[in-house]
Structures are given as C-alpha cells and as structure tokens.
Image (tube, rainbow, N blue to C red):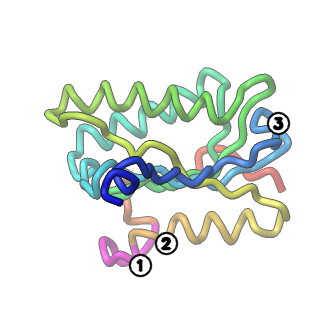
Amino acid sequence: MIQKMNEYKPQRKRLRLSHFDYASPNHVYFLTLCADSRKSPFNNQALAEGIIGSLNYQRERKRIKVYCYCLMPDHLHLLLSPYTGIDITEAIQRFKTFTTNLSWKFGCEGKLWQRSYYDHVIRKREELLEVCEYILANPVRKELVGKPGDWRYSAMPDNLPL
C-alpha cells in the first residue's frame, strides 16, 4: 500500500485552454502572475521598477499592448493583448524569465514567479472597464493606499479597445 501511495503523483491542473488561439490580437486577457512561494519580492522598490520597466520594454517592442496593470507586493495583474504574430503564452514566459534573472541582481534567490499564471479571456467589451477598476483598486482593497491613483506601481499605459 505504501509503495502505491509513493507512485502516485498528483497532476497539476491545466490552466490554459487546449484549443484556444493565444496569439490572436483580437482578444484581451486578464492575467494574474503570482510570486513564488508566497513571497513578497516586489516590496523591493528597485525590483518593482525593473518589473514595470520590463512591461514597458515589451510594449515598446510591439509584443504586447498593456491596457492596465498593478504590481502588488506578491503578484502582478495585467490586462493586455498580443500584437499580431505574438503568442501571449510565449511572451509571458519570456517576461518571467527576464524578470527572474533581474531579481537575482537585487538579492532574490531561486524562482521569482509561480510556475504558471491565471488567465481570463475578456468576452465582452463592457468587462474591460470593470476589470481595470478591479485591477487599479487592488492596493486600496489591501489597505496599502487610500485611493487607486496613489499606488505607484499601477497604470493604464495603452488605450482600451472600446
């Protein structure tokens, strides 16, 4: 019996839709990327600014459009779309790899991010504003600031596709 229990390996739940086109610029995605092991690495101001800088780099290189983001001490919320020919899954993997390497320069060790991320495909244009409000209000709900505009690690850099 013990041997059978040792042979059992739980399967990680698949988070991506198996037949969905994650490279379509016609979709808007709400993503949540969590820091590894419930750490709060983004309390480090230099690292937090590097994370935001990396998002802007992706925007400037026409890989992703970032409609809204909020970097919290332990996670990142994003509302974005890929540019034509860019697979969002690949773009996020590159972002996570780059920012993990960056984090080591600021004293972090090991992995920066959890293995995967949560995504939600926005189906209705009306949801865009609601999701942005949710993202920007995150630091208020966590009582880090009094109003959304006071949080220095959130913004709406690209125009919403309304």
Dot 2, how many residues are within 10 Å of its Cα: few (below 14), some (14-19), or many (20+)? Answer: many
Residue annotated with mark 3: 24
Q: Residue 153, labelled with which disc? A: none
**Magenta region, residue range:** 140-148
Q: Residue at x 61, y 28 (%)?
A: 90
Residue 156 location, x and y as percent? 59, 52
The quadrant of the picture occupied by the C terminus is: bottom right
Which amino acid lies under the numbered mark 1 shown in the image of this protein? Arg
> What's the residue type where badge 2 is placed?
Ala
Q: Classify 105 as above or below 18.
A: above
Q: Nearer the viewer, residue 21 or 31?
A: 21
Which of labels 3 and 1 is toward the front?
3
Q: Residue at x 67, y 47 (%)?
A: 16
Q: Is residue 117 magenta?
A: no
Horizontal and vertical percent position of residue 145: 33, 72
User: Mark 2–mark 1 contact, CB under 8 Å?
Assistant: yes
Q: Earlier in the sequence, mark 3 or mark 1?
A: 3
Q: Secondary structure at mark 3?
A: loop
Q: Is residue 35 visible?
A: yes
Q: Residues within 10 Å of mark 3 (few under 14, many from 20)?
A: some
Q: Which residue is mark 2?
A: 137
156 or 101, nearer to the observer: 101
Residue with the mark numbered 1: 141
Q: Main secondary structure of the magenta part?
A: loop
The CA span between labels 2 and 1 is 6 Å
Question: Which mark is first along the chain, 2 or 3?
Answer: 3
Quarter holding the N terminus is bottom left
151 to the left or right of 89:
left
